[in-house]
Amino acid sequence: MLDVLSLARHTRYFNQTRSFLIFQRIRLLTLLLAVLQTGWVLVDQLLLPTQIQAPIALGRFVSGVALLALLFWYQRPYDLRFALARLFLLLAILSAFQTWSNLLLLDAGHMSAVAGYQFFPFMIVTMLAIFPLTIVEVSVVTAVVILVELVTQISTQRVGMIDEINDLWLLLVLGVIAGWAAVNQLSMLLGLYRQATRDALTGLANRRQVMEQLEGDVEYARERGESISILLFDLDKFKGFNDNYGHAAGDIVLKQFAKILRKQARGKRDLAGRFGGEEFLTILPGADGAAACIAAEEVCNSCRQTRVRIPSGEVVGFTTSIGIATLEPGESSSELLRRADEALYLAKARGRDGYRLAGAEDVDSAATAAKSVAEREPALLVD
Ligand SMILES: Nc1nc2c(ncn2[C@@H]2O[C@H](COP(=O)(O)OP(=O)(O)OP(=O)(O)O)[C@@H](O)[C@H]2O)c(=O)[nH]1
């Protein structure tokens, strides 16, 4: 329920997916409505009194042009604020035309029983059903449509009449039904999104999502000249651990490690994912090398302090090695990843349980620097 109530629990990555879906649907809808809005002028010629044909045709033309402008507004299709602004503009254009045409029709003595006009507000509210929206969003949109209808009724002094009360009631009922469909869509989208993007064992982002996001985040950081760093993790001596204690014990360690990463990548902009096997990746948008090293140190410390009970009843510890890379000017996501991989290799070569920042020749983690390889504890401990 909380998942569909508002976007508070949605990740930045899910918001991007939802925004693009809203963007696509609005484009399809604006195209259809722009054609219908202008094409309906021919129907108006048959049904409307001559004196209001011209002003209504003008209203249709203006709203048709506004819909086309919305159709060709390509800017930031993955930004949720833009997606919701688009939805709001679509409703505003349609509501403005509805109010304009209603006033003209009433002036001409029609009590809105003209084909294509009577159902206009109902069409607007029913349209909600094709968008994946939260309960809060649906409620706001329905309330706005009802408010517009109410204001129109007040301004034409029809408020309180039985037909008008019926209209408001019907709008509310349709709002609830369409809203329910919209929330259902959101819930399905969320479910499918989670299935497609999460790693089944750890619940972190899977490799596909990590790669997609890395590409997007690197491009975004490059465009804005922002820093971005990645941390590539590999659990130490994990093969030996699996061989000694079994795959099920290994899975428990992987889950525990995922918990540590999830806790560490708390910021809305960070993403922690399982890159494959016992390799994990964290994307830290906005973080420079120093901030990434602090994050790496935190993870190393958490691993050292963590103990897990495995099915045999034994309590074990584990460590990780980390390769860090910070985006350099003009670099691509695959180059960034390659440098993190090289840094990881160096961290392993320096004795594991530590991190290495790509390009920083003499910078090692405090733990690595403090201890010689010979002094180091085994990577996987058993208490
Ligand atoms: N339990 C478990 N093990 C996995 C999973 N995926 C990969 N592994 C194991 O992870 C181990 C990877 O080991 P290696 O990459 O060879 O290296 P390592 O033993 O970790 O040694 P270093 O990386 O050099 O410290 C293999 O034994 C894989 O079977 C998984 O989902 N569950």
Image (cartoon, rainbow, N blue to C red):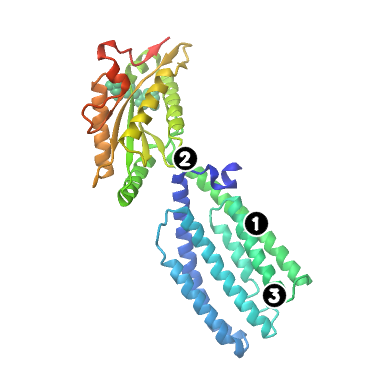
Q: Residue at x 56, y 70 (%)?
A: 94
Quarter of the image with the N terminus in it: top right
In-image side of 300 versus 331 (left or right):
right
- Position of residue 333 relative to residue 56, above or below, is above
Disc 1 to disc 2: CB gap under 8 Å = no
Taking depth in this image into account, of 254 and 348 the one nearest to the observer is 348
Q: Which residue is mark 1?
A: 177
Q: Cβ of disc 1 within 8 Å of ligand 1?
A: no
Disc 3 to disc 2: CB gap under 8 Å = no
Q: Position of residue 25 (x, y in %)?
A: 48, 60
In-image side of 60 versus 150 (left or right):
left
Q: Residue at x 45, y 71 (%)?
A: 68
Precedes in sequence: disc 3 or disc 2: 3
Q: Cβ of disc 3 within 8 Å of ligand 1?
A: no
Q: Residue furthest bottom?
A: 50
Precedes in sequence: disc 1 or disc 2: 1
Q: Position of residue 279 (x, y in %)?
A: 34, 29
Q: Which element is circle 3 on?
A: helix
Quarter of the image with the C terminus in it: top left
Q: Position of residue 93 (x, y in %)?
A: 54, 70
Q: Amino acid at mark 3?
A: Ser
